[in-house]
Image: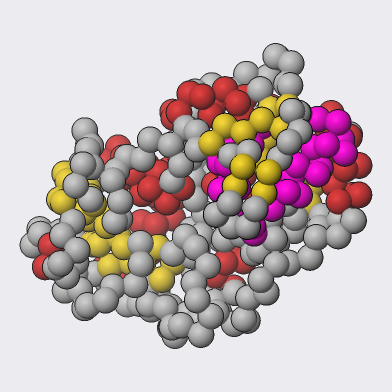
Amino acid sequence: MNILIFHNSILPVSKYGGTERIVYWLGKQFVQMGHRVTFLAQEGSKSDFANIIVYNPELSIDSQVPDDIDLVHLDHKPHHPLRKPYIVMIQGNEDYGVDLDLNTIFVSQNHAKRYNSTTYVHNGLDLSDYGKPTFSQKRTHLHFLAKASWRIKNVKGAIDLARKTHNKLAVLGGTRLNIKMGFRFTPYPSIKFYGMVGGEEKNQLLNNSKGLLFPVLWHEPFGIALIESLYMGCPVFGTPYGSLPELITPEVGFLSNKKSELIAQINDIQQFSNKKCSEYVADNFTIRHTAEAYLKYYEIVLNGKTINETAPTAQEKPVKFLDWAE
């Protein structure tokens, strides 16, 4: 099959960028499975396994799709009709009351359900980007991995959990002083900020971490940080919102919207096996798992059918911040 993957960014991303990494890994995996791949992406994109077409935002996507393409994999609803079969991969929470495309595929069962759909494909990792985790060394800190400037990611909650359990915290994805989303300054020396990190620096920070603090205050569609951290041997301590109950089993983490319950479990962190956390991801959340699932949906649209019978639409108006209690 000849597949075109559209994403309006520069590929590959070097540091932060969950969706960018998924589409790049997906293209690489399809090639390894014997398919041909073309990326329609921003100028500056590079690939040693796929063709690159530089995206021109002044033109329709359809006009930039070569004739020999069999299927188009999009990251948003097309603004103009496409002559080729296509699917739409939605990684985020879309606006309330907006009809999504009939060929929309979500990233978790919970994500799909909130839009009155049953179609989803879990994200997966290209494990070769992370190296082989080690489990014998002393783990020195907890970590937070998300855009700390987004209040829904609740870095303040993670800092509180770390301090109340007397742990050091590495914040990956934020700075000590933030004024973009309301003033926040973190004076505590036990909390270290690393900004937007990637590559080997991020891998080492995760591999030396005791666990991920992920007390989000919204319905997380998937959370690539969850499976990245688990693969590097870190159990997850988060809130029971969105995809988290679907992804985090009692063997690899604990979920609660009550600080006191999370604190108790973090204080008993030795109950979780770093090795089992890593094996859980290797067994269930690799990019090959993701590619195989998408190929099944590709067959549906290639046969002239739609993924959903009716247009997916958010079923409930979102709450700004979900509960976070003592």
Quarter holding the C terminus is bottom right
**Image spot of residue 178 (x, y percent):** 59, 47
Q: Nearer the viewer, residue 227 or 16?
A: 16
User: Splitting the image into 4 quarters, where does residue 61 fall?
Assistant: bottom left
Q: Would you say 91 lies left or right of 247 here?
A: left
**Image spot of residue 152 (x, y percent):** 64, 59
Q: Residue at x 38, y 78 (%)?
A: 102
**Image spot of residue 156 (x, y percent):** 73, 49
Q: Which residue appears farthest toward the left when viewing the image?
A: 67
Q: Residue at x 69, y 27 (%)?
A: 209
Q: Nearer the viewer, residue 213 or 179?
A: 179
Q: Residue at x 30, y 60 (%)?
A: 73
Q: Tell me if residue 156 is in the magenta stretch.
A: yes
Snapshot colouring: secondary structure
Q: How many marks?
A: 0
Q: Which residues are magenta?
A: 145-174
Is residue 191 visible in the rendered image? The answer is: yes
Q: Would you say 163 lies left or right of 35 here?
A: right
Q: Which residue appears farthest toward the top when viewing the image?
A: 137
Q: Residue at x 47, y 32 (%)?
A: 198
Q: Tell me if residue 238 is in the magenta stretch.
A: no
Q: Is residue 220 above or below residue 82?
A: above
Is residue 242 visible in the rendered image? The answer is: no
Q: Nearer the viewer, residue 88 or 276?
A: 88
**Image spot of residue 8 (x, y percent):** 29, 56
Q: Is residue 83 above or below residue 66?
A: below
